[in-house]
Image (tube, rainbow, N blue to C red):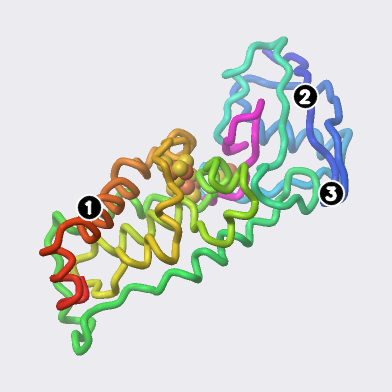
Amino acid sequence: MAYKAKFKVWRGDAEAGELHDFLVEVNEGEVVLDIIHRLQATEAPDLAVRWNCKAGKCGSCSAEINGKPKLLCMTRMSTFTEDEVVTVTPMRTFPVIRDLVTDVSFNYTKAREIPSFTPPPGLAPGEYRMRQVDVERSQEFRKCIECFLCQNTCHVVRDHEDNKEAFAGPRYLMRVAELEMHPLDVADRVAAAQDEHGLGYCNITKCCTEVCPEHIQITDNALIPMKERVADRKYDPIVWLGSKLFKR
Ligand code: SF4
Ligand code: F3S
Ligand code: FES
């Protein structure tokens, strides 16, 4: 049955903004993005929102709903009671461009700082061989839709703007871990994770994992194993010596 929901939507730009109240129709089966689209079609035609697939796959519609980082297109209205106020705000960690749209270029900068897959010199593409177990290990990480909800949530940058320079964030530390687990990659990802991408800032609060819409076990399967590799390198003299001799 259709009903009218109370919405508060943040509107503004980089300079200033505030929550605007709306009373808007909701129909059975709708998600929060449907409601935002209805607002655009009725009361707020210039309301800015970024979206693309409406299927939880493009990672564009990230925002905060009642203070929780979520995809607008994957948050069902049926998760709220009919008299609940639904508050929609832009991701807090990134600069606002307008309304619900933020500038997520921080993430692209961090992505570019990670050297790409580095196979052993002289190995031609047709000679790459991997065991199935190695393929499966990184499969989980490749489900990432780059919604940046984990990046938005991690307190290391959410609450400390000045850490952005030194900290790649969970999504990109996971990328470093993925490459580190690749049996053919010869770059020294362990040293880079700690020294260049700020792995040491992560104190494994797991908030990143909790908000991931793809349910990737970012902390347990990427960040903690990477931290263990760093600790092995630092405190095990044989591993340390091996790393100096063989660059791994
Ligand atoms: Fe989004 Fe999960 Fe990828 Fe982070 S790891 S960007 S939360 S899909
Ligand atoms: Fe941040 Fe995730 Fe680590 S939330 S502190 S990167 S476990
Ligand atoms: Fe693509 Fe929501 S619109 S993930």
Indicate whether residue 193 is drawn in magenta: no
The residue beneath circle 3 is: 13
Among the 4 quarters of the image, the one containing residue 192: bottom left
- Mark 3 and 2 residues: CB-CB less than 8 Å, in contact? no
Q: Whole-Å distance between the Cαs marked 3 and 1? A: 42 Å
Residue type at numbered disc 1: Arg
The residue beneath circle 2 is: 7
Which residue sits furthest bottom?
122
Q: Is residue 206 left or right of residue 72?
A: left
Residue type at numbered disc 2: Phe
- Quadrant location, the N terminus: top right
Q: Whole-Å distance between the Cαs marked 1 and 2? A: 42 Å
Q: Under tag 1, what secondary structure?
A: helix
* Crowd tier of the residue under label 1, counting other residues whose Cα lies within 10 Å: few below 14, some 14–19, many 20 or above: some
Q: Position of residue 175 (x, y in %)?
A: 38, 59
Earlier sequence position, callout 3 versus callout 2 = 2
Query: Magenta span covers which residues?
Result: 58-73
Query: Who is closer to the viewer here, 39 or 160?
Result: 160
Q: Is residue 206 left or right of residue 155?
A: left
The residue beneath circle 1 is: 137
Please, is residue 29 above or below residue 206 in the view?
Answer: above
- Quadrant location, the C terminus: bottom left
Query: Who is closer to the viewer here, 220 or 164?
Result: 164
Earlier sequence position, callout 3 versus callout 1 = 3
